[in-house]
Amino acid sequence: RDLHSFPTRRSSDLSRGIGERAAFPTLQLSPEQASDVRFGRRLALQLPAEGPVAVFDDDEFLALYEQRGDQAKAVAVFV
């Protein structure tokens, strides 16, 4: 396949989390929860799905979290 025929992503797509919203279940966080995520802290909540869940503060993609017992734990933090 010609290299130029592959779809590309704009940098504006990355900041809005378009790919993450398509690839993972998502969860919108409160400002307090988003602050905890920025420090990689566990969250005392139930995630909406099993496996990695993309967490957001407004339109900013912050991290991937997974459920660990009664808390959610960071798998990867991107901020």
Image: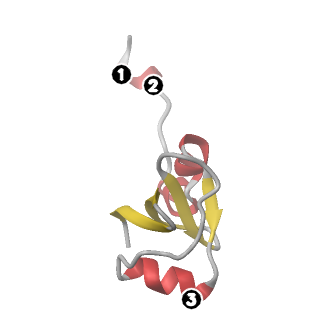
- Residue visible at 59% across and 60% down in the picture: 47
Task: Please provide percent x and percent y for residue 58.
Answer: 64, 73
Give the class, few, some or many, for how many residues have Cα within 10 Å of label 3's Cα (few <14, many ≥20): few
N-term mark: 3 or 2: 2
For the residues bearing labels 3 and 2, Cβ distance under 8 angstroms: no
The quarter of the picture where the N terminus appears is top left
Q: Amino acid at mark 3?
A: Glu
Instruction: State the image quarter where residue 3 is shown.
Output: top left
Residue at mark 2: 6
Give the class, few, some or many, for how many residues have Cα within 10 Å of label 1's Cα (few <14, many ≥20): few
Task: Please provide percent x and percent y for residue 11.
Answer: 47, 56
Give the class, few, some or many, for how many residues have Cα within 10 Å of label 2's Cα (few <14, many ≥20): few
**Residue that lies at the very extreme toward the top in this rendered image:** 1
Task: Please provide percent x and percent y for residue 79.
Answer: 38, 73
- Mark 2–mark 1 Cα distance, whole angstroms, equals 6 Å
For the residues bearing labels 2 and 1, Cβ distance under 8 angstroms: yes
> Which numbered dot is residue 32?
3
Q: Amino acid at mark 1?
A: Leu
Indicate whether 77 appears above or below 49: below
Residue at mark 1: 3
Question: Which of pointers 3 and 2 indicates the residue nearer the eye?
Answer: 3
